[in-house]
Image (cartoon, grey):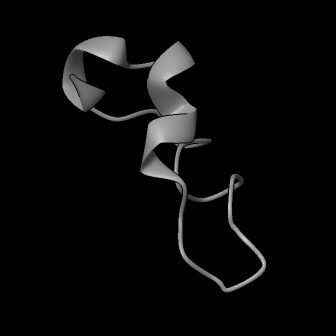
Amino acid sequence: MKCPSCGSINVTSTGMPRRWQCMDCDSTFAR
């Protein structure tokens, strides 16, 4: 499954979660 720090911690100023930012923890899922 996706890592908890993905999309939850990495959030843009607009409030949209950076899914591509969590490629370091779940590159297989993001790919």
Q: Quadrant of residue 15?
A: bottom right
Note whether 30 is above or below 19 in the view shown: above
Q: Quadrant of residue 11?
A: bottom right
- Where residue 6 sits in the image (x, y, percent)? 53, 43
Number of dots carrying numbers: 0
Question: Residue at (35%, 15%) from the top-left corner?
Answer: 27
Looking at the rendered image, the quarter that the N terminus falls into is top left
- Where residue 31 sits in the image (x, y, percent)? 21, 22
Note whether 22 is above or below 6 in the view shown: above
Note whether 14 is above or below 5 in the view shown: below
Position of residue 10 in the picture relative to residue 17 (left or right): right
Position of residue 11 in the picture relative to residue 25 (left or right): right
Note whether 9 is above or below 3 in the view shown: below
Question: Which residue of the protein is positioned furthest toward the bottom in this rendering?
Answer: 14
Question: Residue at (53%, 55%) from the top-left corner?
Answer: 7
The answer to which of 3 and 19 lies nearer the viewer is: 19
- Where residue 23 sits in the image (x, y, percent)? 46, 23
Question: Residue at (53%, 65%) from the top-left corner?
Answer: 17
Question: Which residue of the protein is positioned furthest toward the right in this rendering?
Answer: 13
Question: Residue at (71%, 54%) from the top-left corner?
Answer: 9
Position of residue 23 in the picture relative to residue 31 (left or right): right
